[in-house]
Amino acid sequence: MTNPVLSVENLSLRYRVPGGSLQVLRDVSLSVQPGEVLGIAGESGCGKSTLAAAMIDLTGANAERTAGTIRLSGRDILSLGQADRRRMRGRDVAMVFQDPMTAFSPVLTMGSQLVDFQCNLDGVSRREKRNRARAMLARVGLSDPDLAMARFPHELSGGMRQRAAIAAALLMRPAVLIADEPTTALDVTMEAQIIHLLRELQADYGCAIVIVTHHLGVIAELCDRVAVMYAGQVVEEAPVDALYHDPRHPYTRALLACDPARIEEHTGRLPAIGGRLPDLTAPPPGCAFAPRCPLASDRCRTLPPPRVTIGPGRAALCHEVAP
Ligand SMILES: Nc1ncnc2c1ncn2[C@@H]1O[C@H](COP(=O)(O)OP(=O)(O)OP(=O)(O)O)[C@@H](O)[C@H]1O
Ligand SMILES: [Mg+2]
């Protein structure tokens, strides 16, 4: 194995909220190899966006890291000064959000913003940056890049804006592209096109991709490896085929238990499981999934589950999973 481009080691993070704090990430460890596509899945509220934002050091002001490190290309990002952190965003890592409007200012043309996004590139003239922007817009499938450059973000369709947001991220040539639900706001056809585009871009540029998604189809089509999150923890990590064919954590099994044809026919999204996430202001002492788990025993309710290594690149956080 080569050195990971991105690694999260034993990360715990909480949000300060009125009257207490939410333990939103608890001892999360993950790594991403160069060129790899890692999917992060799990139901709403389990901490996926928080983890994605932490990877690029963009968690909100009320977020507090209580333990752990995040390394990009081997460097601990939290030990860097502000200027180095800004430089790191772009060169090492860039992000695509669910709502592409968040990436752009509404009052500047796409062209000037795409040029400004390249502020990390030293020794490149403004004219060259415009040319790079134009070429990248064409690459992500905008048929008239010059027209798109002259427009304001709200003058583009949702699909075009998301393509432009991907172009903006890639213009910085990051080693890792982090995408938080980049297709959720799009219709199914557009979603398929964006997934196809991400796959092509990954092949062309060789950047690693971390993609957060609720969508099983996206994971199956795009990802090499998957991390399944539950209540702020990674409960299972596996190569994508292994996860689909032999899910080991009871939570993953529950997610995949529904008939895939039925899932696709209806919404294509992960099904809901009976019960709800535990209160993250006071996570339970044992396994967080125990109250909803068909296999739960007394020890599951009282002792934190061990991280069981199942095989190469495979692990599950569970008392009941055999190595
Ligand atoms: N800035 C914040 N301050 C306080 N609580 C927050 C903040 N951001 C998120 N949360 C809470 O933290 C938990 C995890 O949120 P997060 O957005 O990371 O989940 P998610 O898995 O991305 O969910 P979704 O699938 O709905 O996007 C939720 O309970 C959420 O309400
Ligand atoms: Mg989210």
Image (cartoon, rainbow, N blue to C red):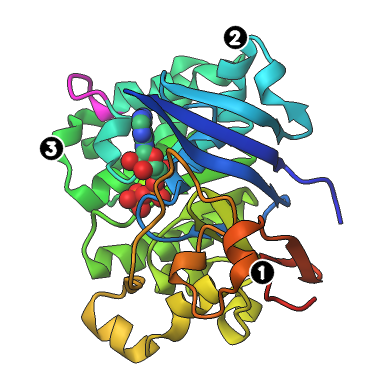
Say which residue appears at 45% left-offset and 66% top-offset.
291
The residue that label 3 is drawn on is 155
Q: Provide the secondary structure element on which disc 3 rests.
A: helix
The residue positioned farthest toward the right in the image shown:
1
Residue 104 location (% of width, % of height): 29, 28
Total numbered labels: 3
Q: Would residue 167 be seen by someone viewing this image from the given angle?
A: yes
Q: Would residue 203 be seen by someone viewing this image from the given angle?
A: no
Mark 3 surroundings: few (<14), some (14-19) or many (≥20) residues within 10 A: some
For the stretch drawn in magenta, the main secondary structure is: loop
Residue type at mark 3 is Glu
Going from N to C along the chain, the mark reached first, 3 or 2, is: 2
Q: Are marks 2 and 1 in contact (CB under 8 Å)?
A: no
The residue that label 2 is drawn on is 83
Specify the segment rendered in magenta. Answer: 105-110
The residue that label 1 is drawn on is 238
Q: Provide the secondary structure element on which disc 2 rests.
A: helix
Going from N to C along the chain, the mark reached first, 2 or 1, is: 2
The quadrant of the image that shows the N terminus is: bottom right
Front disc: 3 or 2: 2
Residue type at mark 1 is Ala
Residue type at mark 2 is Ala
The quadrant of the image that shows the C terminus is: bottom right
Camera-nearest residue between 66 and 44: 66
